[in-house]
Amino acid sequence: MLPEDVVEAATGVIRAAVARGMTLVTAESCTGGLVAGALTAVAGSSAAVEAGFVTYSNAAKTRLIGVDAAIIAAHGAVSEETARAMAQGARARGAGDLAVSITGIAGPGGGSADKPVGLVHFATAGPRGVRHREVRFGDLGRDGVRHAAVLTALEMLQEQLADD
């Protein structure tokens, strides 16, 4: 059901999390739950996946994972600050060891000169703090941006699991 590269990446994340006895939480906006879906597609994922939040709207980011509305007002939903707050809030509210967040502009509309289609902010929050990554994928089409974002989020989880 999922592309092979996504399944392979998710399998690696689940194996690493289980081996380290760590639980995972996701907070997704532009990917709409695809990261959580990829992780839970792996047999045995229940030993590692704690929770997943789809916080597509700004109100959901605030209500479900505690992102301060002032952060969104000051920096926008698609920003480093919001991605960091999403990861921290998801980790706390989801009661997991490691969280990943994704917020971006998948297109085809919604972009601007400052925040074009294909701009995605990611963050992980874990025992060693919060890490952020900004990627400008370009206008790959909605599915292309979402696919690339899922792979990047899984890569970031894998990196933090390798470090912890």
Image (tube, rainbow, N blue to C red):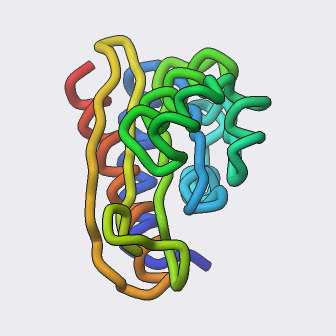
Percent coordinates x, y for residue 127 in the rendering: 37, 12
Instruction: Give the left or right position of residue 25, taking residue 121 as reference.
Output: right
Residue at image position (67%, 40%) is: 52
Going by the picture, which residue comes out furthest to the left? 163
Q: How many marks?
A: 0
Do we see residue 74 in this rendering? yes
Going by the picture, which residue comes out furthest to the top? 127
Percent coordinates x, y for residue 113 in the rendering: 32, 71
Residue at image position (56%, 61%) is: 30
Instruction: Give the left or right position of residue 164, taking residue 2 as reference.
Output: left
**Which is nearer the eye, 123 or 118?**
118
Q: Quadrant of residue 20?
A: top left
Percent coordinates x, y for residue 140 in the rendering: 36, 85
Q: Quadrant of residue 73?
A: top right
**Which is nearer the eye, 26 or 138?**
138
**Which is nearer the eye, 133 or 109?**
109
Instruction: Give the left or right position of residue 151, taking residue 60 as reference.
Output: left
Do we see residue 100 in this rendering? no
Name the image quarter holding the N terminus. Answer: bottom right
Residue at image position (35%, 83%) is: 139
Q: Is residue 64 above or below residue 153?
A: above
Residue at image position (41%, 71%) is: 112
Percent coordinates x, y for residue 93 in the rendering: 69, 19
Name the image quarter holding the C terminus. Answer: top left
Q: Is residue 73 above or below residue 31?
A: above
Instruction: Give the left or right position of residue 93, taking residue 145 as reference.
Output: right
Q: Quadrant of residue 61?
A: top right
Q: Is residue 97 above or below residue 44?
A: above
